[in-house]
Image (tube, coloured by chain):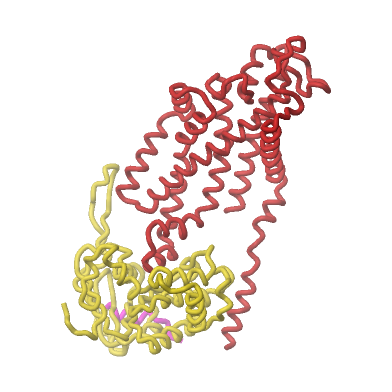
Chain colours: A red, B yellow
Amino acid sequence: MEQKKADDQQKLLQNNSKSNFTHFFKNPVALIALIIVLFLALVAVAVSILSYYGIEWPMNPNETHLDARLLQPSLEHWIGTDHLGRDVFSRMLHGTVISMTVGFTAVAVSLSIGVSIGAVAGYCGGKIDQILMRSVDALLCFPTFFLILTAVALLGPSLINIIVVIGLISWTGTARLVRAEFLTLRETEYVYAARILGQRWWKLIIRHMLPNAAAVILITAILGIPEAILAEAGLSFLGFGVQPPQATWGNIIADGKNYFLDAWWLIFFPGLAILMTALSFYLLGDALREVAE
Amino acid sequence: MSSDSSLLLEVQNLKVYFPVFKGILHRQDGEIRAVDDVSFTIPRGKTIGLLGESGSGKTTIGRTVVKLIKLTSGKIFYQGQNIGAMNEAAFHPWRKKIQMVFQDPHSSLHPKLTIGSMISEALEIHFPKMSRLDRQERVASLLVKVGLKPEMMKLYPHEFSGGQRQRISIARSLAVEPELLICDEPVSALDVSVQAQIINLLKDLQEELGLAMLFIGHDLAVIKHISDSVLVLHSGKIVESGPAHQVLEHPEHPYTQTLLAAVPTM
């Protein structure tokens, strides 16, 4: 009886393991990164809702004013105008929508492929694992960005194509990580216990292994978003991205590069936006990784 | 093959070899003989102790019987059926008859499931027609059976101590009403005081349910306390077997003698 009491006391002592998230919120860098990410997502949602109802705030991003070309940042044009007299701030707001859409959806595509392939490879092991992972190695031999560039050039540049191509090409890292995680999980005793109970293989994966790999998957997802955003910005800059006059951060810079001695704001602000966005996602992913460990 | 109906499990000339690969071409370079020509039987309702040092192959034997590990050669009969040769689908109905309790109570429970859903998962697999309410009742009675409270079914594994987790593990394996329980060092990760509780719980449950047990361990006192007969395993081979008191009090094989001599006396 006394030992049972000791058991109960030990149980009470173990109840203090919920400090992980307070740790996250005490990290100022992570907190700022999270705020920026949430702000960008909010901007993207707000802009797309407003333009759906025909409200363009502060100005129509595609309206040209040839009498107002290359104006400096002012109260009227917060970050100036471009060579066709379009308001750069409005264009950047619409660029946010493109960046966020590409970032999140391309990662969703790459995550679903990467997680499935990694899970099957890690769960099955043996020959299936060998075949899948050697294919991943083969895919990794190509420089990712040039592969994306080639594919988009062949398929034609459109938002859907860009998302699908980035998603189809950038899943390899996720697959490797998930496979490694699954190889470990496969040998844990609770997975053995479920196998001994006769649980089906897909339920083993979905119910017993995936939830315990969720942290790794979430972190690779968040670290994948800036890569997709950067890839899209690169494509747009090279003219293979979303086509003008639709504004993206990349093609604002592409348009502005011819005037950068006279109109520094045309490349400075979109560049800053790309940098800050990518940095925020990376820092957020990094902070979450620390929490997970 | 034996037709004796009191025999639950019969292992004949079991061999489990793990291949060793070498070089980039994955050429097989040799093998590790984890289990080498082992034969034994487990009668209904009895406990067989499997004694051996780490690396002697005792865990491999346990895991091969439940088909977590593929056997290299040999036969495993369960009530006269060669389960060793079955594929996973054919073996499925037998799964509920042979269950296992693991060594480490911290890694043998899914950390993100409540213990209630963990135990009822076992019921869902083998009693798919059971209603939700019946399942819940059954989980509650299982928890009581292993000395826990029914309201604990809503808690997560990290809210329990090592001894309690091992009780949950036992409840999960008993949920499907097995006839044979393979205990893979179920107490070696626990405090000595808790060890005795778990051992006594296993003994009580065995009496109540008529379970047969394959009790794997390296602790002589524990094995002696719980087993009817003992197998001593050394480098994958059985070096001595017989009734527990005989083997552990008057060992004949030199390896068993060194094992016994290594026990610290106070």
Relative height, residue A238 to residue A6 (above, below):
above
Residue in the image at 37% along x and 42% along y: A133
- Please identify the residue farthest to the front as the structure is shown: A53
**Where residue B165 sits in the image (x, y, percent)?**
51, 74
**Vertical side of A153 occupied by B208: above or below:** below
Position of residue A174 measured from the top left corner of the image (x, y, whole percent):
48, 43
B117 to B257, vertically: above or below:
above
- Asked whether residue B191 is in view, the answer is no
Q: Position of residue A229 (x, y in %)?
A: 58, 32
**Left or right: where does residue A159 sit relative to residue A209?**
right
Is A125 or A84 nearer to us in this picture? A84
Q: B34 and B99: which one is in front?
A: B99
The N terminus of chain A sits in image quarter: bottom right
**Residue B207 visible in the picture:** yes
Residue B96, position as x, y percentages in the image: 35, 73
Which quadrant would residue A278 be assigned to in this image? top right
Toward the right, the furthest residue is A75
* Left or right of residue B187: residue B230: left
Residue that appears at 58% across and 48% down: A289
Foreground of the two, A253 or A54 = A54
Magenta region: B255-266
The image quarter in which residue B90 lies: bottom left
Query: For the point 29% across and 42% down, which residue is it?
Result: B24
Which image quarter: residue A9? bottom right
Question: Is residue B115 highlighted in magenta?
Answer: no
Q: Is residue B6 left or right of residue B127?
A: left
Q: Check residue B259 for magenta coloring.
A: yes
